[in-house]
Amino acid sequence: MAACSCQRVSNPGLYCGYCGDGVITTVDNDHVAWCNRAGGCEDLGWRRSCAQQAGPCDGRDSGCK
């Protein structure tokens, strides 16, 4: 998948590109990315819950694909 960047987060995990707190940059709003505590990021691609703006935005998995 595409490269991305995250702010350093205290709660590593999944974040949608639309998340308003600016956690992720260079990720489409409807994509989900894995962010780690050091600011590392991996764009995992399109995700329905992100397209519907239903999260995740806090590192947890919403359970929707």
Image (tube, rainbow, N blue to C red):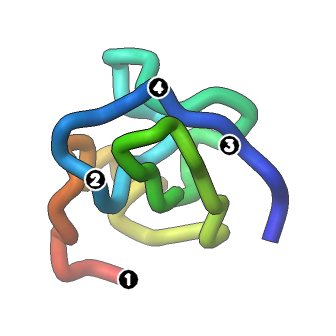
The front one of 36 and 52 is 36
Name which quarter of the figure residue 19 lies in. top left
Cα distance, mark 3 to mark 4?
Answer: 16 Å
Cα distance, mark 4 to mark 2?
Answer: 10 Å
Question: Of marks 3 and 4, which one's residue comes earlier in the chain?
Answer: 4
What residue is at 23 percent from the left and 53 percent from the top?
59
Disc 4 is placed on an element classified as loop
Residue holding disc 1? 65
Task: Give how far across and how far down residue 58 sits, in percent.
Answer: 18, 44
Disc 2 is placed on an element classified as loop
Q: Are marks 3 and 1 in contact (CB under 8 Å)?
A: no
Residue holding disc 2? 12
Question: Of marks 3 and 1, which one's residue comes earlier in the chain?
Answer: 3
Cα distance, mark 3 to mark 1?
Answer: 16 Å
Name which quarter of the figure residue 1 lies in. bottom right
Question: Of marks 4 and 2, which one's residue comes earlier in the chain?
Answer: 4
